[in-house]
Amino acid sequence: MSKLQKTSAQWQAELSPEEFAICRQKGTERAFTGKYWNCYQKGVYLCRCCGKPLFNSDAKFESGSGWPSFYQAMNSDAITEHKDMTHGMVRVEITCQHCEAHLGHVFPDGPKPTGLRYCVNSASLLLQTQEENK
């Protein structure tokens, strides 16, 4: 699959300032402030930048972190992992495989069956609810 490529100006025209800072400049929203951290609607979480499916609400869980958390991605091709050594930490950054939008990080402290916690910025996501799919 080819990558979606746009200029910074194109992304700025399509995204809010917060979405641009998070998705394109690897920012982070404050904990407990994002639209989806405590959302319990059923559906599919899409990439805010390109609309590709990333996470199913069935894999969402309450992590207590203040960000939407999932124990697995929709499929192995949805997300790319990168070593992140910023802020004096070693973490694994996750990005959308299709458009390279920054989503958040993945940690090895999630629930079964994967033991993973994909900790995602709400500003990186759009929820397509089951009602919208009908």
Image: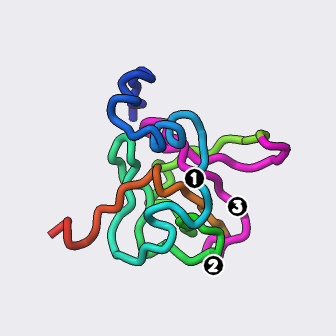
Q: Between tags 1 and 3, which lies in front?
A: 1
The Cα atoms of the two marked residues, 1 and 3, are separated by 17 Å
Q: In the displayed structure, would residue 60 be above or below residue 53?
A: below
Instruction: Give how far across and how far down residue 82 sits, in percent.
Output: 66, 41
Image position of 85 with respect to 115: above or below: above
Colour mapping? rainbow
**Disc with the residue nearer the chain's start (3 vs 2):** 3
Q: Nearer the viewer, residue 28 or 128?
A: 28
Residue flagged by tag 1: what amino acid is it?
Glu
Neighbor class of circle 2 (other Cα within 10 Å; few <14, some 14-19, many 20+) is few
For the point 41% across and 77% down, which residue is it? Answer: 40
Query: Start and end of the magenta stretch?
Result: 87-115
Q: Which residue matches tag 2? A: 112
* Marks 1,3: beta carbons within 8 A: no
Measuring from the top left, give residue 7's x and y in whole percent: 41, 21
Q: Mark 3 = which residue?
A: 107
Do the residues under discs 2 and 1 have CB atoms within 8 angstroms? Answer: no
Which numbered disc, 2 or 1, marks the residue that appears first in the sequence?
A: 1
Q: Say whether residue 111 is magenta.
A: yes
Residue type of the residue flagged with mark 3: Phe
What is the crowding at mark 3: few (fewer than 14 residues within 10 Å), some, or many (at least 20)? some
Query: What's the distance in space between the residues labelled 2 and 1, CA to CA?
Result: 27 Å
Q: First in sequence: mark 1 or mark 3? A: 1
Q: Is residue 32 above or below residue 78?
A: below
Q: In the picture, residue 64 is in which quadrant?
A: bottom right
Q: CA distance from mark 3 to mark 2?
A: 13 Å
Task: Give the label on residue 29, or none.
Answer: 1
